[in-house]
Amino acid sequence: VLLLHYNYSNFFPPLLSSFSSHSYVLCSTMRAVSTLLLLLLSLAALSRGKRRKCLEGTMSEGAIVSATMANYTKMLPESEEAVKVHIEMHVQDMGSLNEISSDFEIDILFTQLWHDSALSFGHLPACKKNITMESRFLNQIWTPNTCLINSKKTMIHASPTDNIMFILYENGTVWVNHRLSVKAPCDLDLRRFPFDVQRCRIIFESYSHNSEEVELVWMEVPITFIHYIQLPDFDMVEFKVLKRNLPYPNGQWDQLEVEFTFKRRYGFYIIQAYVPTYLTIIVSWVSFCMEPKALPARTTVGISSLLALTFQFGNILKNLPRVSYVKAMDVWMLGCISFVFGTMLELAFVCYITRCQNSSRWGKRSERRPAASTARVVRNGGMGSRRQHLLLDDETSTLPMMNGNGNGAHNGNGSCRDGTMTARSIHEVIHPTSSPSPVHFHMSTFDSSTPLSIDQHRLCLSLDSQIGLHSSGVEISPQYHPHPRVSSTPGCFMRFHPESVDKFSIVCFPLAFTLFNLIYWWHYLSKTFEENFTMPANAFHSPPPSS
């Protein structure tokens, strides 16, 4: 500023000869403004440069403290009534709630104010009305020993020294402020998780004195916030202060309680939990559009959807405490799992209907078949009396006719297909005059010269062996055995068709899921809206503490 004033004084006069009168007036005005600015800045520098010194005949701060503490006794202040301790709290910051440990963290400026007549120095010629003292003097005076009775952990900030402020006024009023980091418990109720509202409390109490000796009272503005508090998972929607009187064996104790109300932000869970479950449920309905015979594909879709929901449910529950009651998230996830499980039951029902219909068709086909034929072939002159019974069906059980080269031979009358013969054809070959009735061949043991291959449904004989059977005197005795029939009695589900069940399910399942959504969201969100209307919107917008 001095340099600016010097430049104005030395720079403008040489230019005045070349400027007009109007320019001269402008330059004079600027010079006057610079002079006034210089004066104001000088006064400000003088007023802020040093502390005001005590006048002669007055005592300095050190002398006042020494004189006051010399005759002081660390005892409860003498008073006819209980010592009133005024308390206020400035919230500096908050941490998020921890559901596992059921607590939250908060940084506060905790202020206590009480009167101790033994510390007054108004009778002394003091040059100041109040003295800011070091925190070590707190150990030399009486304090109400106010503590946070319900805190899990309380720590005084040290950055680098303890953040404690101690001011002593001339009338004996003591003003103490601590900067604390507190971990306080919360009474978590997760029945409506993730649409829940949680309440956390901080309780102040004198640890050493009952209400007859110390009375705790809130200040006129008990709670203030230094800045707007915003948590990642919750919104603090309300706080309230209370005063209680709690009985102990040694008397009644005053308690000051502040209760914070937090409302959970459920946007994270909408994106991470609810939307994926919607997609999983819709994917499980894709199996209704598949063919009833596509059993592997439909099973894969159902099992994959069920596993996805189960894994997602477990991922959410691992971040929550183990509680015995049912939460809103439990209702949602179990409901979705039930719908996916219902698709698996629908698949099992469709498969059962398909199997019953297939069995019915095979049963009706077996009724149109002729009676079965049983052949018992006996060769005389064998080594023993071993008998072999061969069951042949006149349509399915065929005897391949082999020539000498092992190739199939075709019967002239067309009774055999693809080089094979039925049991009835064998009987006609051996006994042409016999009627085409079922035959029973009795045959003893077979030697190596009679190659015979027995399968579950077919009996293979070479042409030479059949001729040998006829020439060696095969004893043929007709005997009738009825063919076992498949039960074709329709069950109670035979009137359903797999396609009809799928068409019904593709309409019924979405409608049922929509109804479930309407009931679920109405039940839980309606309570949330009611709380929004009852809670004051500006509950936490208290003015910051005055400096």
Image (spheres, rainbow, N blue to C red):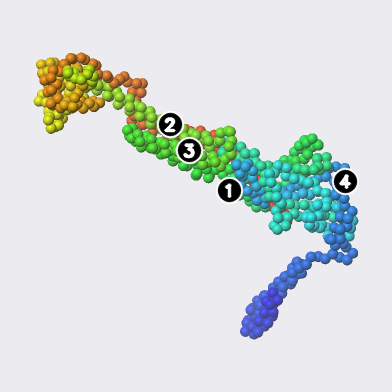
What amino acid is found at the position of numbered circle 2 in the picture?
Answer: Gly
* Inter-mark Cα distance, 4 to 2: 78 Å
Residue positioned 83% across, 40% down in the render: 212
Residue positioned 78% across, 39% down in the render: 253
Q: Are marks 2 and 1 in contact (CB under 8 Å)?
A: no
Q: Nearer the viewer, mark 4 or mark 2?
A: 2
What amino acid is found at the position of numbered circle 1 in the picture?
Answer: Pro
Q: Nearer the viewer, mark 3 or mark 2?
A: 3
* Inter-mark Cα distance, 3 to 2: 15 Å
Q: In this view, which residue lies farthest toward the front?
A: 383
- Which of pointers 3 and 2 lies earlier in the amino acid sequence? 3
Residue under pointer 2: 342
Residue under pointer 4: 78
- Which of pointers 2 and 1 lies earlier in the amino acid sequence? 1
What amino acid is found at the position of numbered circle 4 in the picture?
Answer: Glu
Residue under pointer 1: 232
- Which of pointers 4 and 3 lies earlier in the amino acid sequence? 4
Dot 3 falls on a residue whose secondary structure is: helix
Q: Residue 137 appears in which quarter of the rendering? A: bottom right
